[in-house]
Amino acid sequence: MRPSPRLAAVASALACALLSGLPAAHARTSPPSAVTPPPPASPQASEAEIASFRGCMGRLRTAAAGKDVDGADFDRLTATLAGPDMSVLPLLDRQPEFSTPIWDYLAALVDAQRVDDGRAMLAAHAATLARAESDYGVDPATVVAVWGVESDYGRSFGTRPLLASLSTLSCFGRRQPFFQGEFIATLQLLASGDLADPGITGSWAGAFGHTQFMPTTYQRIAVDFDGDGRRDLVGSIPDALGSTANYLKRAGWRRGEPWGYEVRLPAGFDASQAGRTRRKPLSQWLAQGVARVDGAPFDGVAADARSALLLPAGAAGPAFIVFRNFDAIYSYNAAESYALAIAHLADRLRGGGDFAAPWPTDDPGIGRAERRELQTLLLARGHAIGEADGMVGTLTRRAIAEEQARLGMAPADGRAGRRILEALRAEAAR
């Protein structure tokens, strides 16, 4: 859905994976509370950087005027942007989809709480989702799975002021032309009235709203699904759900077809054939002995359907045959782990279970309920980590590392996994 900077939005998703509490199930929600405008200049910015930023903003003002954002609107909407927020620049190279083990990534994004909440959202918004499926051909579970992973069903839109982040990225770092387009698109959305609050927040890279659209994607794809005359993906759940279905349709989603299936590989299988872009007709995989783990047929796809084999943790872990609809999900955020999280959550929302094959680790990831339990055990041992909220921050990681070292566990890296949880459980039970 967005070019590579869009991957950063799932850093917010990994954070909101650790939050709790189900939002009210109503068609229109209030945006997050207003964020205090940034100070006159970011404390991370030098005088030279502030001067460079101001010169850049002058050039952006001229560029925006050529995109129907007049000078008065530009000045009004950027009045609080006196200096850059240099703290966003290191985040350009920090992508959780590529740095987090797949078993931790999926444990955070597809846990019992997100499944339960998603089923509640399916029921609460059944009429809207049925209309979206009728109009765009995308099933309700997939749309709700995107919503759940992107913002935890509207719980976490991101906390960074969009205009501050996008203006900084427009003037510093790599990919400035890309971010300049996103910055001007945000100004256009605000000037047109689709967005009402110039203090709107989102991910550091500019994705925002219930399903975390980038501004240029918002311009192209968002729909007014509640009929109020505005395309509001921040305050309107129907607009967000309809727009998400519209995106997936335009990305090539095929009505009634599966995203893929978990499969079993035969002994001696050549794993070098794996890869999302290494497509073969399904019949060729079947001829090699690839079969669904449950022994069922490959329903919903033709024998000549172009398909690929994914081995996200190598040949020792779960294996998947994926089809065109997996690619549509992948286009929303170009990371296979992300697309697998959406696809797996959608399956769980339909009543499916966890993957049949285990991940190749002796220390699987844990979900929010288990993270809260782990924090409770750490608190009982005297670690000052704050409340047991399921959010694994610096204090929790430091406490875990101390306990790992005390117990002789290696590495003592502060990771919240099943081994340290079970070790502390066992001690507490004595």
Image (cartoon, rainbow, N blue to C red):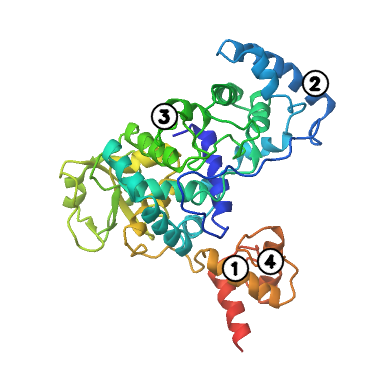
| Dot 1 amino acid type | Arg
User: Gap between marks 4 and 3, in whole Å?
Assistant: 41 Å
| Dot 3 amino acid type | Ile
User: Gap between marks 1 and 3, in whole Å?
Assistant: 38 Å
Q: Which mark is residue 221?
A: 3
Kindly identify which residue carries mark 4: 387
Marks 4 and 1 close (CB-CB < 8 Å):
no
Residue 101 seen anywhere in this rendered image of the structure: yes
Kindly identify which residue carries mark 2: 51
Query: In the rendering, at what x and y percent does residue 42 appear?
Result: 78, 34
Dot 1: element: helix
Kindly identify which residue carries mark 1: 372
**Does residue 57 appear to the left or right of 179 in the view shown?**
right
Residue positioned 55% across, 72% down in the render: 419
| Dot 2 amino acid type | Ala
User: Gap between marks 4 and 1, in whole Å?
Assistant: 9 Å
Mark with earlier residue (2, 1): 2
Q: Can you tell which of label 4 and label 2 is closer to the viewer?
A: 4
| Disc 1 residue crowd, few under 14, some 14–19, many 20+, Cα 10 Å | some
Dot 3: element: helix
Mark with earlier residue (4, 1): 1
Query: In the rendering, at what x and y percent does residue 344 appear?
Result: 37, 54
